[in-house]
Amino acid sequence: MLYSMKNPEHQRYIAQYGKAYGTTLLHRLLPDICRARNLFVFDSYEEFEKIEDQLPEVFALRADAKKGEMPTFRVEGTWATREDVADYIRRVKESNPNGVVLCVDNEEWTHEKVRTDGAFNVDFSIGSSVRVDFVGQGFDMGVISKGKESHETWCIDWDDILFLTPSNMNRYREHIITERLVRTPRTTEPQSEREGTDDTYLKRVQTNDIYLESAKRRLEYLLRIGYKPEELVGMIPKQYKPMSLDFKDKIIEQIIMPIYEQSKRLKIDKLTSFGVHGMIIDGKLFPLEVNTQARCAPRSYFQEQQDDGER
């Protein structure tokens, strides 16, 4: 088997594989910011040799598997040269004998893990809402796509999208990692039913402690996968910096609005629930793929943000 994203006859075969299909969907839905110039799917070195002259000197490798089958674990996406391909295929097959390799002719930085301005997932429920998750500087989109972390989250009603701007986006913010809810004794009587009727209330408290725990987990992970301590100095700030107005503008104008304008066709195609995820690098959006509902992990990070008294 050997498939190419540029070959229309191969599209239905590529659609069998989760990450590969996500890349082709990204190319179709958001061509202006898709960083993949071409993508090949293969499972042997002999197949790679047939297409290696179509690749630049450096390209991206990713491990993939058919949708609904056992995924390919512990094989990270990476930048590679021709000399790296044989060993990468071996690692994929050791992890999953039915796994395949994606070879992607990408713009530089697409698989950067550390030198990032942050990472995002824009989750669409067509006709209902748009949910935006963001993690800050030094993070990649892996923790979001696996449902493990979010430093900020916004949820925008579908009918409000046309009125969404960078300056009013925080009206829709549901969560920021520098705030937590603490159950606090009342000192005055509740003024309305909304304030509750018991002798305590939930108070928003500013704290950096939860973010520091997230940063620590991130550093431990990067060290575990082979980064050296000196490579990580200064890469992850000690204080969380919320998403900037410039990044909000790019998310709105380059992802949310283009998908909104295609919503009628997406409903016809029955593609109504998916996410666009990627990194922000040097001020530019680097989306990696479109995650359909079947590949979206459940969000577990909100369980860690609930009131201490409710755990």
Image (spheres, grey):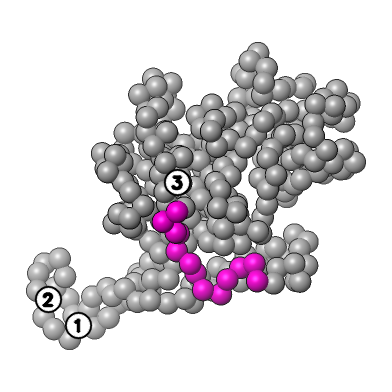
Of 16 and 263, the residue lying toward us: 263
Q: State the separation of the CA atoms marked 2 and 1.
A: 8 Å
Q: Who's the residue at 37% across and 33% down the image?
A: 260
Residue 290 visible in the displayed image:
yes
Where residue 244 appears, as percent x and y from the top left, is 44, 59
Q: Residues within 10 Å of mark 1 (few under 14, many from 20)?
A: few
Where residue 253 appears, as percent x and y from the top left, is 42, 41
Q: Which residue lies under the disc numbered 3?
A: 251
Q: State the separation of the CA atoms marked 2 and 3.
A: 40 Å
Name the amino acid type tagged 2. Answer: Pro
Name the amino acid type tagged 1. Answer: Arg
Q: Which residue lies under the disc numbered 1?
A: 186
Of 83 and 165, the residue lying toward us: 165
| Kind of element beneath mark 2 | loop
Where residue 283 appears, as percent x and y from the top left, is 55, 53
Residue extending farthest to the bottom is 187
Which numbered disc covers residue 104?
none
| Pointers 2 and 3 in contact (C-beta within 8 Å) | no
Q: Who's the residue at 87% across and 38% down the image?
A: 82
Locate the N terminus and report the quarter of the image it occupies: top right
User: Which marked residue is nearer to the observer: mark 2 or mark 3?
Assistant: 3
Which numbered disc covers residue 190?
2
| Kind of element beneath mark 1 | loop
Q: Quadrant of residue 66?
A: top right
Q: Which residues are magenta?
A: 234-246
Q: Who's the residue at 71% across and 22% down the image?
A: 4
Q: Is residue 298 above or below residue 8?
A: below
Q: Quadrant of residue 219?
A: bottom right
| 61 horizontally vs 212: left or right | right
